[in-house]
Amino acid sequence: MHHHARLGSAIANMRCAKVLLLVSSLMLLPCTTLWGQPYQGPIIDAHGYLGASFNWEIMVEAMDRNNVTQRTVMARYYPGGPRDLPGSDEDAVRLAGRYPGRFFPLVGMQLPLLTGSHKWRSPDREVERLIAETERKLASGRFFGIGEFIVRHWSYSSGPHAEQENPIYSTFTRRMSAIAARFEAPMVVHMEGYPALVDDFSRLLAEYPNARFVWAHNCGRSKVPVIRSMLARHPNLFCDLAGMTNVGTTGYGTGWPRMEEFTALIEQDGVLYPDMKALYEEFPDRFMLGMDVAHAPGNNLQNYSRRVNRFRDLLGQLKPQTAKKFAETNAIRIFKLSSAVRR
Ligand SMILES: [Zn+2]
């Protein structure tokens, strides 16, 4: 599999024009017939963040320059450093108000108060208050989902919130699932695909069939058979490809901050692995894109463009109708973004 991908990427890296010359003299085939040109249409960034240090103008400019029309925003309440201050749901709502139709706040769950698995098993007063506030916020009609729930997270920075090990099937997640079902607001979950956690997630998905779940980062970087089995069994499960672009810098798509027996990447050098590509064509209605810019220093035009462009290359390898669903249609349906027009 990897050898084929390398060969494919080697070919793709050749100047298209040169290949076009070589081939067209023989068969008059345009490049696009051979391996597809990058996806050209509008894109929705269905995995976005906000912190107090994010520059809003830069966010909008990066979207405009890359034809990214809409973006979800999840407040990151964890502190990132002196130049990467924590955000809030209130900021996310202000951002959405300032640029109508472009940003869609989710009720943020990257909260220091959720550190400690005992709080997920038996919510304390703080967590009870969070559950009540989440209901109130969803009832306001200003929020389009809940997340990201940090269930199993690998440490890539110092600080007490980096390494997280929380139960996916717990009092807290069950109560939130009931709320998510009632308000038809999806829950975005970050959970590295440990087999025992995947089984527990299955239980939660089956128990709340009317709640929609978005398992971030290509379903916790799981391998194809695991993702296929989960999607086949649970029609209420969706995945985003946030952070899975392997653009050579730090990102989940490069196997960073670590890899385990159960983790997988989706691409190498801009070429989808064949088994992953087959999975995407098998489930064209279940995946979305996400740029996964979670920290203020990464909120710049170069970083954003690099991720969008890599997604455009990857989408170009899918059937056009699948690419459009991944880029736009699925996010609109799953997060009910079209309902925002009426507000
Ligand atoms: Zn995440």
Image (cartoon, grey):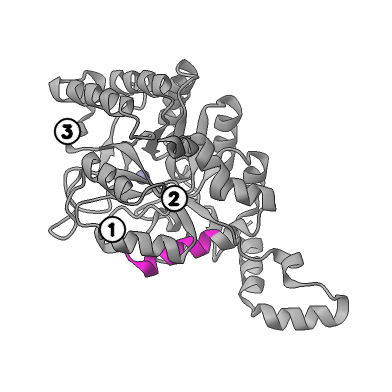
The answer to whether residue 14 is seen in the rendering is yes
Q: Position of residue 143 (x, y in %)?
A: 34, 34
Q: Is mark 2 within 8 Å of ligand 1?
A: no
The magenta span reads 298-311
Location of residue 285 with respect to 83 vertically, above or below = above
The answer to whether residue 276 is seen in the rendering is no
Is 125 positioned to the left or the right of 316 in the image?
Answer: left
Mark 1 = which residue? 56
Mark 2 = which residue? 70
Q: Position of residue 174 (x, y in %)?
A: 35, 19
Point out which mark residue 94 bears: none
Quadrant housing the N terminus: bottom right
**Which amino acid type corresponds to the residue marked 1 in the rendered image?**
Trp
- Marks 3 and 1 sit apart, C-alpha to C-alpha, by 27 Å
Q: Nearer the viewer, residue 48 or 155?
A: 48
Location of residue 144 with respect to 235 vertically, above or below = below
Most common SS among magenta residues: helix
**Which amino acid type corresponds to the residue marked 2 in the rendered image?**
Gln
Helix, strand or loop status at disc 2 = strand
Q: Considering only order in the chain, which callout, 1 or 3, is on the residue closer to the N terminus?
A: 1
Q: Considering only order in the chain, which callout, 2 or 1, is on the residue closer to the N terminus?
A: 1
